Image (cartoon, grey):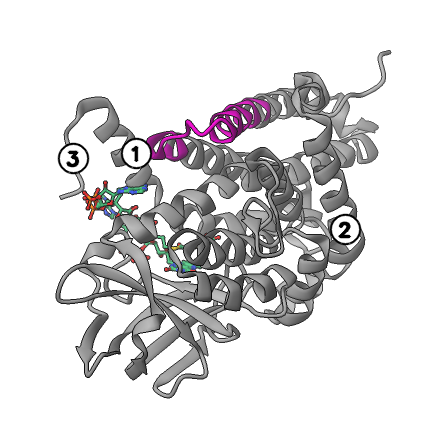
Amino acid sequence: MPSPQTPFDLFGIDGVISETDAAVQDAVRKFAEAKLRPRVAEWYESGEVPVRELAAQLGELGVLGMHLDGYGCQGASATAYGLACLELEAVDSGLRTLVSVQGSLAMYAIWKWGSSEQKSTWLPPMARGTAIGCFGLTEPEFGSDPAGMRTFARRDNGDWVLNGTKKWITNGSVADVAIVWAHTDDAIRGFVVPTDTPGFSAVSIPGKLSLRASVTSEFVLDDVRLPDSAVLPTAIGLGGPLACLNEARFGIVFGVIGAARDSLETTIAYTMAREIFGKPLAAYQATQLKLSNMTLKLGTAMLLALQLGRLKDSGKLRPEQISLGKLNSVREAIDIVRECRPILGANGITLDYSALRHACNLESVMTYEGTAEIHQLTIGRALTGQQAFR
Ligand code: TGC
Ligand code: FAD
């Protein structure tokens, strides 16, 4: 009998990843398995995650803003960033979310749209993980349609005064700095808001059944007064925050494949060890059909992710292509983890096995960074030239 191969072996995935990118992936995988996996069930069960400790460790590893250059960031390739997301999300989507929000949303907003003073103040400590950032776009009444936001920034004697509420904000209640998007008299603008500014208050949202190893918050801006230097000078209009979303969505295209790979590999190992009616569960045709279908979904999702990585590394990746990837990766990952769960039998409902934890997490990932419908409509718009959002 040939010796068993992993799903990625079957697709020859390692052979199409460059040595440099593979080295990054390997380092993140070793870190994640040694430092994160042993503690993740405890964080998930308690709903308490040591964000500051983790941010410092992730900063030391070099993954915070790793695809940016300058200001303490390592300027890694987009593909390497995607592979790092994959290895973190193989442990838990909440851990990849921390890295996405810090690097692709909060840091990227400053890196892309900020003044040189904003960059030199915030990017080095954020890359080290000694300063934590959050990104406030969504509001209680406006998620998929951020243009409707009610948060408003008005001019007052050369200052800006912000009022509004942002909800579902990752790390909002533990952050040192919030990137806040608000309407002004002219256009949507972004603001760099130190969270100790008077009038800023944040609370964690309790009772989550998903992404429990991540802090999700609501914050209120009550006459938050900021100097003119707090505005992101070059972000004018909704394109400002949407450009940041492209970065985070790209990481998710790879990330969720990690959750699916972890569930599938765990399940394959389980079926080989578990004896039922006198032989291993893996030896039944019904099991092998399921494993084959899941492997096909996983491998093809990874090939699309790698193609998008190549396009991004050559500067050619378009937003509608990111929508293809986010829609496909999340959809396939959810299918895989949900199919893995019952194969693990009763063991599959516990925290000892990751499939159900991943399945619960992916409910959040399906909703955030553009729901499935938003990405379908983005693809539809690209195909037809007609927008059907409104
Ligand atoms: P629309 O009229 O299409 O566009 C407004 C302006 O923005 C430009 N634009 C983009 N620019 C860069 N990247 C993109 N992907 C862009 N999409 C559009 C566009 O060209 C236009 O520019 P201009 O110069 O003409 O003004 O805007 P719309 O109001 O019709 O909305 C479009 C829609 C629905 C696709 C968009 O609003 C959307 O993506 N909605 C989903 C919102 C969302 O994903 N929110 C995520 C919040 S952050 C989060 O969830 C973090 S979770 C944690 C983690 O990431 O791990
Ligand atoms: P809604 O917009 O109310 O959508 C409800 C339903 O309507 C969805 O199924 C949607 O697909 C559907 N729908 C919407 N428009 C259409 C249409 N045109 N046609 C057909 N159907 C449609 N936001 C941030 O700004 N920063 C963060 O850090 C952040 N972190 C998050 C962390 C978690 C754990 C979660 C769950 C969310 C987070 N979000 C964050 C918010 C997230 O981006 C929003 O929840 C998301 O954009 C969807 O918005 P909504 O929840 O208001 O749903």
Whether tag 2 and tag 3 are in contact, CB under 8 A, the answer is: no
Type of amino acid at the residue the image marks with label 1? Gln
Task: Using the image, tell me which numbered label, if any, was put on residue 376.
Answer: 1
**The residue at label 3 has a CB less than 8 Å from ligand 1:** yes
Image quadrant where residue 270 sits: top right
Instruction: Tell me which segment is drawn in magenta.
Output: 299-323
Mark 2 or mark 1: which is in front?
2
At a point 65% along the width and 40% down the height, the residue shown is: 263
**Majority secondary structure in the magenta region:** helix
Type of amino acid at the residue the image marks with label 2? Phe
**Percent of width and height locating residue 114:** 40, 59
Residue 161, above or below 18: below
Residue lying farthest to the bottom in this orientation:
198
Residue 71, above or below 348: below
Residue neighbourhood size for the residue with mark 2, other residues' Cα within 10 Å, grouped as few (<14), some (14–19), many (≥20) = some
Q: Is residue 358 visible?
A: yes
Task: Using the image, tell me which numbered label, if any, was put on residue 31.
Answer: 2
Residue lying farthest to the top in this orientation:
1
At a point 51% along the width and 35% down the height, the residue shown is: 335
Residue neighbourhood size for the residue with mark 1, other residues' Cα within 10 Å, grouped as few (<14), some (14–19), many (≥20) = some
Residue 287, above or below 204: above
Q: Is residue 213 visible?
A: no
**Percent of width and height locating residue 256:** 55, 41
Type of amino acid at the residue the image marks with label 3? Gln
**Percent of width and height locating residue 204:** 47, 75
